[in-house]
Image (cartoon, helix red, strand yellow):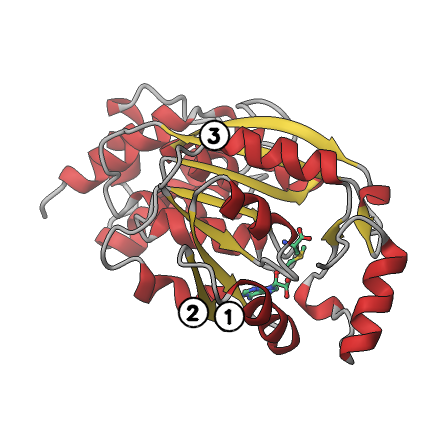
Amino acid sequence: MINYNSSASLRAFLEQEGLGMRKKFGQNFLINPAVRQTLVDALDAPNGSEVWEIGPGLGAMTAILLEKGLKVKAFEIDAGFIKILKREFERENNFCLVEGDVLKTWKSRAVKREAEYLFGNLPYNIASAFLADLIEGGCLFKRMVVTVQKEVALRMTASVGSPDYSSFSVLCASAYKVKPLTVIRPSSFFPQPNVDSMAVMLENRNAPAVVPVFFPLLRALFSSRRKTIKNNLSVFCASRFGNSALSARFLQENAINSSQRAEELTPEIFLSLAKSIDNVRL
Ligand code: SAM
């Protein structure tokens, strides 16, 4: 049995296995058992349901998910950790390992709706890109509980008008109700990261699917934050329709004041603006 709760034991275990921790894969193990349990409890997935676990590492969380009777599909990139995961969990019927970069592997797994829940102490270097990729790809879960850098969590949970409100906040809000769960201090990890982390829960809003233009529109409107919505929208309309003047019509249809900036608009306004643009047939 691996002792997941102490830096010294994990260091000794890794040494004995001839393995090391790799910064480029954002490897920080959550060594605080109370926090691990809190996060799995927050996922609140019923017995027998399927969960994607992103970055299982040596399997500290995987073990708890399996104990809860969940079917775990674990996505791991590190060949050394993969070897350990196979050894620890290969006899478990409810465990399935997907080897490789989750940014590349998730799509082939999502063709058929497989999992309702997603869980993970996400590798910090890919956390926001991965979540954005899932949402843009229409791969939505019933509930997700993810641990990310606090700075990323603040962007995910920010509401309109706050300094952290960004295109990523709107993207998350377009599909999920996003709730901060708990701040996790560096001392809860091995090795200790330089910054605080935060666990976040995303509950599916079961909203109608967004129109595809929503995603490039969002990027375009937040691309130059100092510019007004009118300026950014004009550039977007020029490239999409060859007609920058159309922006005035969209602003009017959505009761947006031309001097407003993207960070002043609620997710609902972005969604309705995207619908107006989608309706145009030239
Ligand atoms: N779940 C473990 C825990 O909480 O103790 C480890 C979490 S650690 C922050 C992130 C994990 O994601 C590592 O196991 C790392 O190897 C893995 N990882 C990093 N980049 C990945 C990628 N692109 N695809 C799949 N796994 C990745």
Residue 148, picture quadrant: top right
- Farthest-out residue, top: 255
Residue pointed to by mark 3: 44
Report x, y in % for residue 200: 58, 34
Q: Is mark 2 within 8 Å of ligand 1?
A: no
Q: Amino acid at mark 2?
A: Lys
Any part of residue 235 in sight:
no
Taking the image in four quarters, ligand 1 sits in the one at: bottom right
Distance from label 3 to label 1 (Cα)? 27 Å
Residue 153, picture quadrant: top right
Q: Nearer the viewer, residue 74 or 2?
A: 2
Residue pointed to by mark 1: 101
Task: Give left or right: position of 24 versus 86.
Answer: right
Report x, y in % for residue 111: 24, 59
Residue pointed to by mark 2: 104
Q: Amino acid at mark 1?
A: Asp
